[in-house]
Amino acid sequence: MKTIHEAIADMNPGERFSKPWNSGGWKFATYGGIAVMSPTTDPNTKGNFPPVETVILKADECVSEPITMPTTLPELKHPIKCRECDGEGGLDCNECGQEIQCSECKSSGYSDKGNLGEKFELFDGYYYGLKYVHLLVEFGANVFPEIGEWENTKRLRFVVGDCVGTLLGMTN
């Protein structure tokens, strides 16, 4: 079974964060509005990675009570319009200007990469990408709403074993 780090890294359509990385005794993975870290004894990974540790609270820093996660969720709709070619199936070559096949969707115009799913109301009028909610339920996360709000969203802190993470909400 995949770890939560690998599952998050697999969501990533870009190359920059295509795999988890290590820094300062922590293993990290991130994609868009979700980030996770866990202790590691592996050496640091070289590269230019975002300082996600500044937005992730450790498990003992969670101040709210955990929320009850749903036991059944709507299915994710597949596939979605390709983000790389905007559903066109092809792109203009940067070198010669001719149209080339989109490598992301294989010219179909549809892809699941980057599919966060529709907005899903998790609690009290706060919305999250359905794909992220599926991930938290799949890994049995304990989920804590953050006290502060940002642009009508509420960040969630989550704990999966020795991993801690944060999930940004979607605007209402």
Image (cartoon, helix red, strand yellow):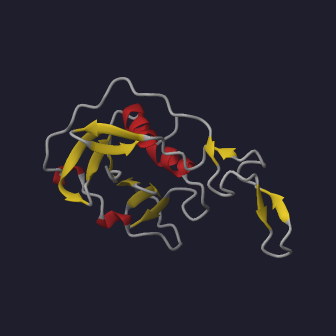
Q: Position of residue 58 (x, y in %)?
A: 24, 55
Q: Camera-side residue: 144 or 49?
A: 144
Q: Position of residue 40 (x, y in %)?
A: 40, 55
- Of 121 and 26, the residue lying toward us: 121
Q: Residue 81 at what x, y percent from top left?
A: 63, 47
Q: Is residue 59 above or below residue 151?
A: above
User: In front here: 131 or 49?
Assistant: 131
Q: Is residue 64 left or right of residue 133?
A: left
Q: How many marks?
A: 0
Q: Is residue 5 above or below residue 84?
A: above
Q: Give how far across and how far down residue 113 sits, in percent.
A: 60, 48
Asked if residue 52 is positioned above or below residue 2 in the image, the reply reads below
Seen in the image, is 121 located left or right of residue 59?
right
Residue drawn at the location 55% of the way across and 56% of the way down: 19
At horizontal 37% and vertical 62% (from top left) the residue drawn is 25
- Identified at 14% across, 46% down, the residue is 64
* The quadrant where residue 54 appears: bottom left
**Which residue appears at 26% of the width and 41% of the height?**
143
Give residue 112's quadrant in the image. Answer: top right
User: Seen from this angle, which residue lies furthest top?
Assistant: 72
